[in-house]
Image (tube, coloured by chain):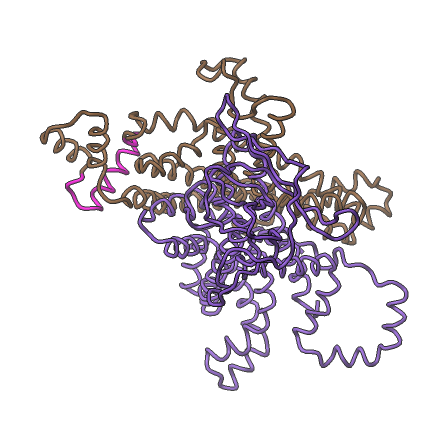
Chain colours: A purple, B brown
Amino acid sequence: MTVSPDSPVMAPTPDDKRPLPTNGEVAVSLAGLVEDAEAIYVAPNWKLVWWRFKRHRLALISGVVLIAVTIVALFPEFFSTQDPNQTSATKSFIPVQAVHFFDEGRLRPYVYGVQGQRNPASLRMEWQIDEATRIPVRFFAKGYEYELLGFIPTNIHFLGVASPEAEEAIHLLGTDRLGRDQWSRLMHGSQVSLSIGLVAVFMSIFFGILLGGISGYFGGLADLVIQRLIEILQSLPPIPIWMALTAAMPRDWSVQQVYFAITVILSLIGWTTLGREVRGRFLALREEDFVVAAQLAGCSQMRVIFRHMVPTFTSHIIATSTLAIPVMIINETFLSFLGLGLRPPAISWGVLLQEAQNLQSIVLAPWLLLPGLAVIITVLALNILGDGLRDAADPYA
Amino acid sequence: MLQYIIKRLLLLPLLLFIFSVFSFVIIQAPPGDFVTAYIAELATSGSSMDQAQIDALRQLYGLDQPMHIQYLKWIGRILRGDMGVSLDWQRPITQLIGERLLLTVALGAFTFGFTWVVAIPIGILSATRQYSFLDYFFTVFNYFGVATPTFMTALVLMWLAFSYFGISVTGLFSPEYVDAPWTWGRVLDLLKHLWLPAVILGLDGTARLARVMRANLLDELKKPYMEMARAKGLSEFRLVLKYPVRLALNPLVSTIGWYLPLLFSGSVIVATVMNLPTIGPMLLRALTSQDMFLAGSIILVYCCLAIIGTLLSDILLVWLDPRIRMEAS
């Protein structure tokens, strides 16, 4: 098998990394072989895929991580400790206040307080972790008011200061230049970053299936034109092109318009990989007996395509799309990092990392780089999950 | 073989045409034209132009004519080696890009070399010692290589170098060589600075390439000719290097076509973060300051670099793989 050169991550060959069944498993499966064979014979496609996917441990773990990230992205306010846009000039560059869970052997989470002092030479606030003061924190604490999912008013947060009346605030990932809480911004950023990846991939799927399908099913001139188009788009250096396109967006566009434009711009080149894959599938399937049979039985063209052909490679499309999401997320991060993607007040991981754009700010406040870890973890999990899905996608192999 | 290459070369003018139209659209994208922007620029510095001068400028750039004529004039000037004047820098664009093009290509070439020199041995090791500690180690390394945005790697390394060794690893030259003419000393100085951005930029590509190499080689290693050669008593080392590795390299060569555009593309970000004197940071600055003639020209240069890369990979592939050569003729 040669791996297609344009796939985002090279998947291991299907027999890769799958733990061999231990002797016990073999014995069990031998005993239940007859029923198993029966079960496999009647199992629908998705069940076979799931059985095979389950054997890829790392992919399962990645799946759990991604569910957690998705929950955060759905309820960012709940996981925040402070309003992400609340600035405070006197609280800039507070370092990370890590949560200590155990106090004298008992589960009583707290963070150490901070002591600020203005440096007489640089006139900057300099913060010291003050181990003498302990700020008790607790789960499901009361905090600022917000609307869960946009319509349920509440003030319960996942983590917060135990006594909200006190003036103290906690900054789990420190604060930035303007004294905004990095942790809360990270939580809100995950919503935008993840959803941009998803929306851009959905758009790529749409274009990819449409154009790849036309190309593969009808062939001829349409195929020629679409193939050349894909070739041209793939020989473009993507980042300069994206930079130029995003820079051409009018400055007065609202956050929503910019958001939508970026997903379109990203999927403009993103669909080509999927388009190629879909075309290849259509080309191979066109000659298959069951397709010919369907055509002879008088099925309409649409029915042949959507009822008979598409279901045979849906799992592949899902796997390829999963591998395309991290690419989109990284690209959005790139653009926003350069200041050409989403612009404040929008918050995304790239916008957060923009604060850490040069050496001076990192030397001053290394914790500004921490949102990058969120990017790495999410992209890593998506890649591993995608590889697992791709291996499982063809259960008959 | 010649036929095949000629066929690819014939496609070039079409590609160049499409890319030049695209660059021109980018130049035209912001409201107003070059001369209005220029007048505004002059006004901020306190000077102004009279109407006759303005009209003369408009005529020079053909701004009073319809779009397609403007495009033709623009492309005509470019073919004669004149890309216009940068508003922001107040200098001819050809000169600005020329100064930085060599370093851009050097960074790309260096990174490319690094990627191949590192990825192929890693791929061979992981494939021949499948499921060993090394294989797993490289698998983990590959996943992280792909998942870490290049600017993160660059920032973290810059930070570590600064806080532990007190050195600044930005730029491509030591201060005394920045504006110096090209001498051996300057070249050596460049090499001293070039390797770090090259490694950072190449990390992601190395990871991908090593994966391709591993997968290709694994397929080859299972083939019967391997048994045959072993039965004949060929040493394992020579056997692997002589047959399967050569075969596994072919698909790798075809990756050059998509890897080179990505490389030049990714270098924009690394160069911006590390403040390298390549055309990448210049593009960012041009875009943010709406210096559209410069931006469009740089985009065109990037597209040309990408096309040259694709062309090179095509030629290399034909030269290496007799099957393609036969098919084409």
Determine which quarter of the picture holds residue B12. top left
Using the image as rendered, state which of residue B11 and residue A164 is in the foreground. A164
Using the image as rendered, state which of residue A336 and residue A274 is in the foreground. A336
Using the image as rendered, state which of residue B302 and residue A35 is in the foreground. A35
Quarter of the image with the N terminus of chain A is bottom right
Residue B287 left/right relative to B151: left
Horizontal and vertical percent for residue B252? 62, 45
Horizontal and vertical percent for residue A37? 79, 78
Residue A393 left/right relative to B222: left
The number of callouts visible is 0
Q: Tell me if residue B72 is in the magenta stretch.
A: yes
Determine which quarter of the picture holds residue B86. top left
Horizontal and vertical percent for residue A201? 50, 59
Does B59 appear above or below A216? above
Name the residue at 48% across, 67% down: A213
Using the image as rendered, state which of residue A311 and residue B192 is in the foreground. B192
Residue A167 can be seen in this image:
yes
Q: Residue furthest front?
A: A165
Q: Which residues are magenta?
A: B63-84
Q: Residue furthest bottom?
A: A297
Residue A122 left/right relative to B84: right
Residue B321 can be seen in this image:
no
Q: Residue furthest left?
A: B52
Does A185 appear above or below B101? below
Quarter of the image with the C terminus of chain A is bottom right
Q: Tell me if residue B306 is in the magenta stretch.
A: no
Name the residue at 38% across, 36% down: B298
Horizontal and vertical percent for residue A14? 71, 59
Does A86 appear above or below A362? below
Name the residue at 60% across, 52% down: A163
Name the residue at 28% across, 29% down: B85
